Amino acid sequence: MLKYLKYCLLLICLQSCIDEVPIIQKSESPKSLVIHSFINPDSFVGATVSEVSEITNPYNWINNANLTILSKAKGLFSFGNFGNGKYQLNQNFLPNDSLKFQITHSLLNDIIPIKIPSRIHIKRLDTFTTLISNVGKTKAYRIYFKDSAYNTNCYRIYGIRHFKKYTIDAVLGKVDSFLYEDKLPIGGTEVCFLRNSYNNYTTKEILFNDEIINGTESRLVFYETLPRVKSKSIVLYQIDIYLENIDINIFNYLNSRNAHIWQQNSITQLPTSVIGNISNGFGVVGGYTNDVIRIKLKN
């Protein structure tokens, strides 16, 4: 008993000698800006600007930046600010136009050169049913388009499916419906798809370049990675297939972003850094052209 009391007394003395060290929480976020602007000839130019913040903190939108675009063909234009970090320029630019995007702010001053890609056009799209290993019977798409031999191009293909969700009553009757849309899970076995290893990290889009198809009329095949399942509560009524000609900056950004998102869910891999083209900042500014074909489905 006496031995037990000695140990208790020693423990109390040791605890009294321990000083608590206060934990100083330091922010690891760099003081810089995040900028995104995707420039398409068919629409006015938009941009978003925010300050880098912790992942658990809300967005810190920046509304006092000065954004301009200098076009080799049209001249100099300034963006207007519409709050919540949103900027807009009521001007569009032509395919193959050379631009200089400039941002001026106390945290960042940068000029980003941009070359809008050439116009892309889908000549035809065929659909057919096929068998894919690990998928089964599914829909495939054969897309025809013309590649420009003059430029080095990068491409993105993705599909948007539109469907109705019905509320079913006790006697299996349709009571009400709601419209939804999401990205179609797709895959491909063409060489230009397989050479881009980043395609392993996403099923929502396929990215590739024109190293094989440069200057020829191109025919590419891709397929849905999920089998079509008939359902009374969900009815698929339209699929939109998009083909985009994107500049190298957007191509690198989307590639690394897809890998980063996928690797964040893995306990064995360190997420890839997202590649941008903002010096001393984050995000991407680039140009793209696109075309779309809509497939109406009969149910």
Image: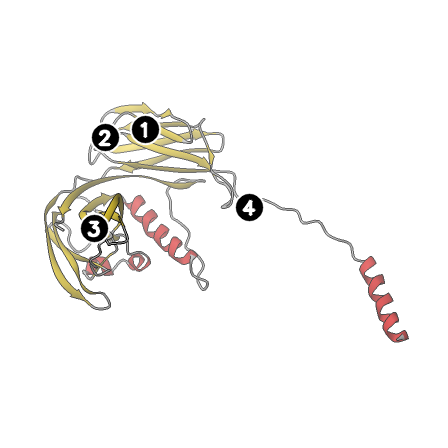
Q: At 21% from the left edge and 44% from the top edge, which residue is drawn?
A: 245
Secondary structure state at the residue bearing disc 3: strand
Q: Amino acid at mark 1?
A: Ile
Q: Amino acid at mark 4?
A: Glu
Which residue, given by chain and number where applicable, does mark 4 sit on? Answer: 28
* Left or right, residue 277 beside residue 206: right
Q: Are marks 2 and 1 in contact (CB under 8 Å)?
A: yes
Q: Earlier in the sequence, mark 2 or mark 4?
A: 4
Determine which quarter of the picture holds residue 249: top left
Which residue, given by chain and number where applicable, does mark 2 sit on? Answer: 93
Q: Earlier in the sequence, mark 4 or mark 3?
A: 4
For the residues marked 2 and 4, what is the alpha-carbon distance in whole angstroms?
39 Å
Of tags 3 and 1, which is closer to the observer? 3
Task: Inspect this view and state whether residue 156 appears.
Answer: no
User: How many other residues sit within 10 Å of disc 4, few (<14), some (14-19) or many (≥20)?
Assistant: few
Residue 69 disc label: 1
Q: At 35% from the left edge and 36% from the top edge, which residue is drawn?
A: 112
Q: Amino acid at mark 2?
A: Phe
Determine which quarter of the picture holds residue 292: top left
**Residue most toward the right?**
2
Q: Amino acid at mark 3?
A: Val
Secondary structure state at the residue bearing disc 1: strand
Secondary structure state at the residue bearing disc 2: loop
Q: Earlier in the sequence, mark 3 or mark 1?
A: 1
What is the quadrant of the N terminus in the image? bottom right
Task: Inspect this view and state whether residue 171 appears.
Answer: yes
Residue 235 disc label: 3
For the residues marked 3 and 1, what is the alpha-carbon distance in whole angstroms?
45 Å
Q: Earlier in the sequence, mark 2 or mark 1?
A: 1
